[in-house]
Image: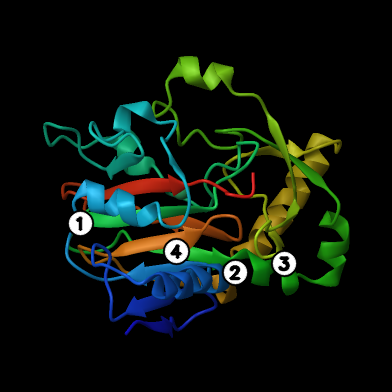
């Protein structure tokens, strides 16, 4: 019997009584899928999964697709990308370690950003390296009217590495050069739930379209300051074997780099497409 237990915070729930890799009745999975949409982040605790079991579980939520970072893809399963701070020889990989650090949501530089992202912890340092999540539905709903009235109806120009250079070296230059800017509403409606949330994020945005640069920068700074308030956040403290999936269209996430750099930190990750596209 599965149980959905809300986390102590403004988003997130844990699934008890079942763990990924076990068989599951369709009705139980539907309850998990609904809990995912309602709570924006789900955590499952259990043993370490083989890549195929991880992929198969993620695929229950929607079609998967290979990540743009080709050099980090799993050799056997291209839908799985390895998130690691060490290269194959065990040397510190600063590019790999920098992935996911800082507030963002994934794939917002794509015409149809992903529904969700799933991570599974394979190896963890002795301390640190938590992942923060923030509820962007709540950030929108609680936004002061003075700010909200200025951002409603605006459009953002989005681009991989639009504001940060954190992905430098991850995506091949040839693939980067093929990408075109895309445009998304600053306040976006989740196509499955109909709920509005703050969609612009501090990584993959160039500017507010049609606004002078200085004004755009100033407004984005105000939006980001509001959205990163602690009242919207919950923090995942990882254990090996944890699987976490987040609703990428309505939540931001932020990896923390506050762990010992000489220790391995490694996850499997996959991306769930938005089925409404
Ligand atoms: Fe991310």
* Alpha carbon separation for disc pair 3 and 4: 18 Å
Left or right of 49? Residue 28 is right
Q: Nearer the viewer, residue 153 or 26?
A: 26
- Residue 173 vs 77, above or below: the answer is above
Q: Secondary structure at mark 4?
A: strand
Considering only order in the chain, which callout, 2 or 4, is on the residue closer to the N terminus? 4
Mark 2 or 3: in front is 3
The residue where tag 2 is placed is 229
The image quadrant where one finds the C terminus is top right
Q: Residue at x 81, y 37 (%)?
A: 209
Residue 114 point in image, percent of width and height: 54, 47
User: Is mark 3 in CB contact (under 8 Å) with mark 4?
Assistant: no
Q: Secondary structure at mark 3?
A: helix
The image quadrant where one finds the N terminus is bottom left
Q: Is mark 4 within 8 Å of ligand 1?
A: no
Q: Residue at x 32, y 52 (%)?
A: 56
Considering only order in the chain, which callout, 1 or 3, is on the residue closer to the N terminus? 1
* Alpha carbon separation for disc pair 2 and 3: 12 Å
Q: Is residue 259 shown to the viewer in this render?
A: no
Considering only order in the chain, which callout, 3 or 2, is on the residue closer to the N terminus? 3
Mark 4 or 2: in front is 4
Considering only order in the chain, which callout, 4 or 3, is on the residue closer to the N terminus? 4
Q: Nearer the viewer, residue 259 or 233?
A: 233
The residue where tag 3 is placed is 140
Q: Is mark 2 within 8 Å of ligand 1?
A: no
* Alpha carbon separation for disc pair 3 and 1: 36 Å
Considering only order in the chain, which callout, 1 or 2, is on the residue closer to the N terminus? 1
Categorize mark 4 by other alpha carbons within 10 Å: few (<14), some (14-19), many (20+): some
**What label does residue 49 carry, if any?**
1
The residue where tag 4 is placed is 132
**What label does residue 65 carry, if any?**
none
């Amino acid at each position: 019997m599965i149980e959905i237990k809300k986390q102590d915070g403004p988003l997130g729930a844990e699934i008890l009584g079942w763990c990924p890799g076990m068989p599951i009745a369709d009705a139980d999975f539907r309850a998990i899928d609904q809990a995912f949409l309602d709570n924006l982040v789900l955590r499952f605790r259990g043993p370490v999964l083989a890549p195929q079991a991880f992929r198969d579980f993620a695929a229950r939520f929607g079609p998967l697709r290979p990540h743009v970072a080709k050099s980090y893809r799993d050799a056997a399963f291209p839908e799985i990308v390895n998130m690691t701070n060490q290269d194959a020889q065990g040397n510190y990989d600063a590019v790999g370690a920098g992935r996911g650090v800082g507030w963002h949501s994934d794939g917002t530089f794509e015409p149809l950003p992903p529904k969700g992202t799933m991570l599974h912890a394979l190896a963890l340092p002795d301390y640190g390296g938590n992942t923060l999540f923030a509820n962007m539905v709540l950030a929108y709903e609680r936004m002061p009217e003075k700010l909200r009235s200025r951002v409603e109806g605006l459009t953002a120009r989005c681009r991989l590495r639009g504001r940060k250079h954190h992905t430098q070296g991850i995506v091949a230059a040839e693939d980067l050069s093929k990408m075109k800017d895309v445009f998304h509403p600053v306040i976006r409606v989740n196509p499955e739930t109909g709920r509005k949330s703050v969609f612009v994020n501090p990584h993959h945005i160039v500017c507010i379209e049609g606004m002078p640069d200085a004004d755009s920068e100033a407004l984005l700074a105000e939006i980001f300051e509001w959205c990163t308030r602690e009242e919207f956040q919950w923090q995942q403290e990882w254990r090996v074997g944890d699987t976490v999936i987040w609703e990428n269209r309505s939540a931001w996430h932020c990896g923390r780099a506050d762990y010992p750099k000489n220790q391995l930190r490694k996850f499997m990750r996959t991306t769930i497409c938005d089925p409404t596209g």
